[in-house]
Image (tube, rainbow, N blue to C red):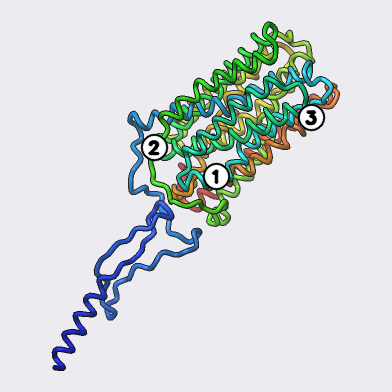
Amino acid sequence: MEKDIRESDASETDTASEDRVVYSDSRGDRDIEKSGSLPAPHTTEAVPTPMISDPSSEPSSSTDPDPAPDGGLQAWLQVLGSVVILANTWGLINTFGVYQAYYETDLLKSNTSSEISWIGSIQASLLLLVGVISGPLFDAGYFRHLLITGLTLIVFGQFMTSLCTQYWQVLLAQGFCIGIGMGLTFLPSAAIVSQYFTKHRALAIGISSAGSPVAGIIFPVIFSRLEPTLGFGWATRVIAFVLLAISIVPVLFMRTRLPPSGRARAFIDKSALRDWPFAGFVIAGFFGFMTLYVPFFYITLFATSHGITTPDFAPYLVTFLNLGSVFGRVVPNAIADRLGSLNVLVACTFASAVTAFGWFGIHDLGGSVVFALLYGAFSGAVVSLTPSVVASMTPDMSRLGTRLGMSFMFTGVSILIGTPIAGSILGDFTQAEWQGTMGYGAAGLFIAAVFYSVSRALLYKRNRRWRD
């Protein structure tokens, strides 16, 4: 009988060893139940530990167990959809320079430059600030909801802008309504492209971001051509109809590749707070985006107030800014896949600062065109490289949306206050005030370049390699 009892105990021990252990896979919160034989208590083999409940303590890996295709029809359809979203978001923001000039000389001429620039800065800041919400929701699997709601708000806000006659109306329609819609769509569009590309991620994001300057070329021409004949309302409505038509593309084709976690994450990734290279990158972005759009908002006004060109041609300087930006969003990103996104970002930010200082020497139309092309190219690279840098700094791709949201939160605040500060410095358009505005824009970009360099050095100290 004792023998039978010993055999029964041994059998129970073997059965107990067939235990179910919960692992946390490298994509984040998705639990995998896996069964297998655990080693006997007297062995020295390591036993897998249960999943840790604190998200910041979960194991992460930069290796995706389901590798990105880095090409193919489905992947490039995501890029095409992202091109349209960038046209609907940053493309409209890049167009605001012609609205700024029109508002100051016609519709809102009783308001100051600083007050009018709040419309564009609120629009641009909400594009980034709302990412704090849309990022975790994207990680949780609500991409389609974000996409359709955001595109609807953008188109609706543009139509409402065409009906506005007072400052508060324009602020609500063009500033808040369009801005919130942009924030719901922009971050997810960058994150979804990162899911489909690894080796060529920077190039794919660069191509997708080219939609912004292309729209920035077309929309100012539409407005400046139609406004004198059809009026402000119909010129703005034509742009709204264009936005409505092209929005069909992302709705039809854009789909996430990685399965969602199934629940919304926290708005803050605690592990990022201890990531010093990422912290330096975020600080740099704050100073850079605070001043990056000063030329986009004020170059048209600069040209007309200095007698450089006629009011009819001045809006085309915004077109030249965006034309340069087309090359700046594709070529540097292609180089970044070979040399590292952060390395190229450091170089392009320094180049943007040097070009911004060159604004002091502009006195004729030729110089204005050259400045617009060069500044558009370098500043476009700064914008388009940012998502790929964040992706390269994110060890767990299931947290990409959250980290993008954290980064965009700081740059959103800086854009919100940046151009109104420039408008306050500009004051009554005296030469000294114009120089103060130019110096403010150039100095912010130079400080950003310094902090990007600090981030680069810290990243090298941690990883011991220059290409990240």
Of residue 339 and residue 123, the one placed in the foreground of this image is 123
Q: Which residue is mark 1?
A: 456
User: Looking at the rendering, in which quadrant would you find the N terminus?
Assistant: bottom left
Question: Between disc 3 and disc 2, whose residue precedes?
Answer: 3
Question: 163 and 132: which one is in front?
Answer: 163
Distance Cα–Cα, label 1 vs label 3 = 37 Å
Q: CA distance from mark 3 to mark 2?
A: 42 Å
Judged from the image, the secondary structure of the residue bearing numbered disc 2 is helix
Type of the residue with mark 3: Glu
The residue that disc 2 covers is: 196
Q: How many marks?
A: 3
Camera-nearest label, 3 or 2: 3
| Res. 304 image quadrant | top right
Q: Position of residue 347 (x, y in %)?
A: 56, 34
Q: Residue at x 65, y 39 (%)?
A: 412
What residue is at 21 percent from the left and 76 percent from the top? 14
Whether 396 is drawn above or below 37: the answer is above
Question: Is residue 92 positioned above or below 29 on the image?
Answer: above
- Three-letter code for the amino acid on which mark 2 is drawn: Tyr
Q: Residue furthest bottom?
A: 2
Q: Residue at x 49, y 22 (%)?
A: 246
For disc 3, the marked residue is 115
Mark in front: 1 vs 3: 3
Left or right: where 208 falls relative to 299: left
